[in-house]
Amino acid sequence: MTVGARPALVADAAAVTQLLARVSEESPYLGDYGLRATEDQIRTILGAPPNRLVAWVETAATPGGGEVPVGYAHGLAGPYSTTRHVATVTVAVDSGYRAQGVGARLLERVVSGCRAAGYVRLRAGVWRTNVASMRLFERAGFRLDAVLPEQLRERDGTLVDEAVFGLSLREGG
């Protein structure tokens, strides 16, 4: 059972790094090719200025009375003035908490936060074989913008297409 979602903080870097490592071990979609980030890299992302980052964690209670992240999502805008209006969205949920709405809740908060921050568009790259993630983004209103052939490589060397989803945050968009 989750405790609830809250904005991710720099202080969450170690726990978020551990969450991403767990998800990477169990999922072919992150692995060594995706979010296998170091704690320093996650600390840098979480320390990005508010005009570049919207990040949330969903936590579960630990036996000792603390909390541990079981889901993480962020929208990270480009570093340059020419790309700062578009945020790339990432969602990761611990396997024991999937199919419980954690990813959807986190994605909803990221979309809302990015809209409030004035972003114009969101994008998400998804492995074409990751049907659950494609459905998550589609249910949140994202639309397929492009398919990039053989963009990703599985651990066994198999090449997989990347589906690029986008969401306009403009009114009526």
Image (cartoon, rainbow, N blue to C red):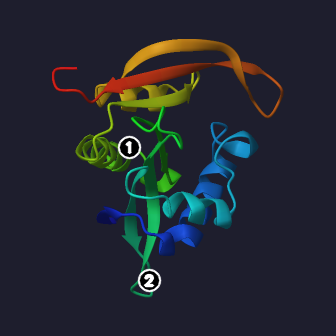
Residue extending farthest left: 172
Q: Name the one closer to the observer, 136 or 84.
A: 84
Q: Quadrant of the C terminus?
A: top left
Please, what is the three-letter code of the amino acid marked with disc 1?
Ala
Q: Name the one closer to the observer, 100 or 87.
A: 87
Q: Quadrant of residue 119?
A: top left
36 w.r.t. 80: above or below: below
In x, y percent, where is residue 111?
30, 41
Residue extending farthest right: 157
Q: Quadrant of the N terminus?
A: bottom left
Mark count: 2
Q: Name the one closer to the observer, 103 or 11.
A: 11
Callout 1 crowding tier (Cα within 10 Å): few <14, some 14–19, many ≥20? few
In x, y percent, where is residue 144?
43, 16
Please, what is the three-letter code of the amino acid marked with disc 2?
Pro
**Badge 1 is on which residue?**
99
Q: Residue at x 38, y 57 (%)?
A: 50
Q: Residue at x 41, y 82 (%)?
A: 66
Could you tell me which secondary element the residue under label 1 belongs to? loop
Q: Quadrant of residue 139?
A: top left
> As drawn, is 67 to the left or to the right of 28?
left
**Badge 2 is on which residue?**
63
136 w.r.t. 18: above or below: above
75 w.r.t. 60: above or below: above
Q: Residue at x 73, y 40 (%)?
A: 33
